[in-house]
Image (spheres, grey):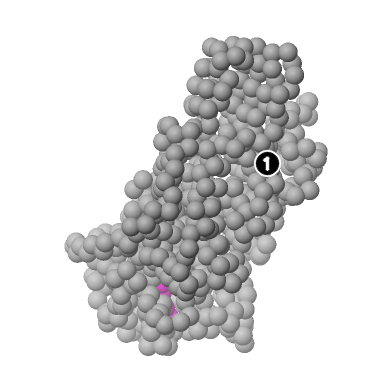
Amino acid sequence: MTVLLDITVPRTVDALVARFAEGHRGASVEAWVFDNAAARRVAEARLAAAGVKARLRSAYKPLVHYFLEEMRGVQGRIAVGLPAHPAGSAERFRLEAYPLAGMYPEAGVTFGPGGAALAYEVSVDGGAAVSVFAPNVMRADPLGVEVLTPCGWLRHVDAAGVVVSDGPLETEYEAVFRAGMAAVMGHGWPRGWPCFEVLAIEAEMPGIELGVPYGDEVISTAEALHEDFYFSILDVMKARAGLGPMDRTAQPGQIVPEIVTVEGPARLRIRLRGHDAVTVSRPGPETIEDADRPPTEAQIVAATDALGGEVRDIASVQGRVVVARVFEGAGPAVLLSAGQHANETSGIVGALRAARVLRAAGRGFGFIPCENPDGNALHHRLRAANPRHMHHAARYSALGDDVEAREGAPLYEKAARLALIEETGARLHLNLHGYPSHEWTRPLSGYVPRGFELWTIPKGFFLILRYLPGHEAGTREFLEALTAHLAEDEALAAFNRVQLAAWAAHAGAVPFPVLNGIPCNIGESTRQTVPWQLITEYPDETIYGDAFRLAQRTQMRTALKAVELFAG
């Protein structure tokens, strides 16, 4: 095992108390930090006991925290003027204000232009505007691009009223990320792929872990740090190999940030280690119809085994089973798959349920319920510590690439998809996916996730239909009929109405047609090997209970109706 870094960083609120508790009686201190409200209130009280007037606020999503902490129970129309900083568009700050419109649906939250200062201007029912500071600083991201990012901030006025400081304050949150990225970027990596088996980023961090009164929304600095570390390291590895930031073929190895929230100082350890051990269990068949959470590998295997069919299993990079089956039967053959991105879990259950119905009906199809079992195993392990997080480290394979984008031998997991398409002659690929059920951010890299701007907040269940050149005919009619059927589920229709309204308030118009309440993106593709590929996108990272049941039911209904319509 190689350790790249092992550091401890003092908690910023504790450092502020130590700094100002002696010799500053009569002073006032305002600070913005990446820590929870309870810790900030304790620090304020300790400073007050020392004669210092202190107010500590959240540097992460300051406007939302202002409403949660300082304007509880507000009633009336809310108008927000957005900062007009030249390096941070109003759209960025409108997204940062999410999910304010969802939190106050009756108030009719509106957003408009504000001033040049880094502050939101908030008024209720046309009253006097209140300025809500949004601390940000220009800094180079790990790719060297200058971006405007949230930061810590300190305003200190001494007892005589003299402003001693009013500027950025490096918090433990920022220091851990800076040190971690420096350690990774400064390491002597070998040439070629992969560079490691597992790059483990293990952090214990004070911070915010807060459910928000809207949908499945959660504010988590630990989750945001996971996203910043994962995608920043992946970006750096791509750039090192001369690949663009949107390339999905890079195979550096498995990058695994594990960020847990603690009360105390921050600690970061980065080390290289081997792959997780593969454990295999074979329970009896599991009931999946009422599944309220992601299934385990053993459950997936058992449910698939119960269907029978011709076994076409192959091994993953880490030695797990990529379950693949061929079912002979009537009708034009299709391929039904899920779990390409293993943290998108509702499609796995939806696919298993749809396969059971298709099998009973005597339909012919190829079936892969989870294309990325290594990612699925990682996802289950990460969820044990942080069940509400998106865990995009489980999105890609153990090699670090997107299974679908893999090009060269050995193909490992992708071989199952290609083999089943060839064997069945499938002309439709039902590719069940998901995306974040709550806001996705990278606060220390410019806030909105680069390359995934359209995915930063949920917009309900939607569909993507990709067709090969010359196969566009009938795509619109197909989606019209499919969405009309799906809209018959009132729970889904209501869910989409709420999410699309919040999207409209914070992001503007959906950038593709909405058919029967379901956004649909139709476009030509030359990357696929079947004439039509229908991709489902349900906001399922990470949901449980009735929310998960609606998601997996929607995935099943979509697959079954699509097969029916395609058969004509």
Asked whether 400 or 280 is in front, the reply is 400
Give the image location of residue 117, x and y in percent: 78, 37
Left/right placement of residue 318 relative to residue 19 reads left
Going 62% across and 12% down the picture, which residue do you hit?
25
Relative to 64, residue 294 above or below: below
Going 39% across and 70% down the picture, which residue do you hit?
371
Q: Is residue 142 visible?
A: yes
Magenta-span inclusion, residue 336: yes
Q: Amino acid at mark 1?
A: Asn
Left/right placement of residue 18 relative to residue 260 reads right
Quadrant in which the N terminus appears: bottom left
Left/right placement of residue 76 relative to residue 276 reads right
Magenta-span inclusion, residue 334: yes
Q: On the image, numbered disc 1 is attached to which residue?
A: 136
Relative to 396, residue 426 above or below: below
Give the image location of residue 292, x and y in percent: 35, 52
Asked whether 374 or 150 is in front, the reply is 150
Relative to 496, residue 66 above or below: above
Q: Is residue 498 visible?
A: no
Quarter of the image where one finds residue 103: top right
Relative to 276, residue 164 above or below: above
| The residue stretch that appears in magenta | 332-337
**Number of numbered tags placed on the structure image:** 1
Going 63% across and 75% down the picture, which residue do you hit?
523
